[in-house]
Amino acid sequence: MDNGTSQSGPAQVELPVGPSPTDTTPPEVIWHSPPDNAQVDLSGSVPISDSLGLAYPPTVLVEFSEPLASATVNGTAVQLKDAPGQGMQATVAYLDGANQVSLTPREALSNG
């Protein structure tokens, strides 16, 4: 990501999705934000404070074609990784009814 002044290395979100024993068709990703290879402006990357601590932009949203088992959407199943593949702290939430997963970084993406 590049803001014209500084550049951050790419981050990777892993979200394995598979069918349940009674549903043989896995959910499909309908959309996600930010999109692939997005240029995110880091100039305003100021963390905000919430009840869990500091939250850093950008929050990643992924929408699926069907509901997910909410108990399976957690920090083990959904992970934020830096360019070399090291795990980064993040909060994962399932937005039931919207079929969306949100991932909020809990540490700043590194410049580089």
Image: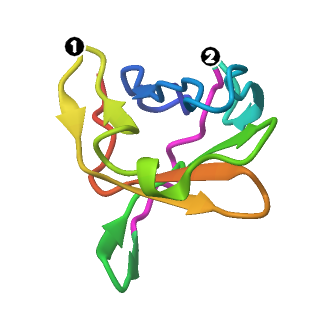
Question: Looking at the rendering, which quadrant does residue 104 occupy?
Answer: bottom left
The reply, left or right, for residue 43 in relation to residue 64 is left
Question: Looking at the rendering, which quadrant does residue 111 occupy?
Answer: top left
Q: Vertically, is 82 above or below 107?
A: above
Q: Circle 1 sits in a helix, a strand or a loop, which is it?
A: loop
Main secondary structure of the magenta stretch: loop
Pointer 1: residues within 10 angstroms few (<14), some, or many (20+)? few
The reply, left or right, for residue 89 in relation to residue 29 is left
Residue stretch in magenta: 38-47
Residue at x-position 47% and y-position 32%:
5
Q: Position of residue 55 (x, y in %)?
A: 39, 65
Residue at x-position 31% and y-position 70%:
54
Dot 2 amino acid type = Asn
Residue 8 within the segment the image draws in magenta: no
Chain-order first, disc 1 or disc 2: 2
Q: Vertically, is 52 above or below 83?
A: below
Instruction: Identify the residue under disc 1.
Output: 84
The single residue placed furthest to the left in the displayed view is 86
Residue at x-position 50% and y-position 43%:
42
The single residue placed furthest to the front in the displayed view is 22
Disc 1 from disc 2: Cα separation: 17 Å
Q: How is the image coloured?
A: rainbow
Q: Position of residue 103 (x, y in %)?
A: 48, 50
Dot 1 amino acid type = Pro
Pointer 2: residues within 10 angstroms few (<14), some, or many (20+)? few
Q: Where is residue 21 in the image (x, y as percent from the top left)?
A: 55, 29
Instruction: Identify the residue under disc 2.
Output: 37
Residue 41 within the segment the image draws in magenta: yes
User: Where, quadrant-wise, is the C terminus in this rendering?
Assistant: top left
Residue at x-position 56% and y-position 50%:
69
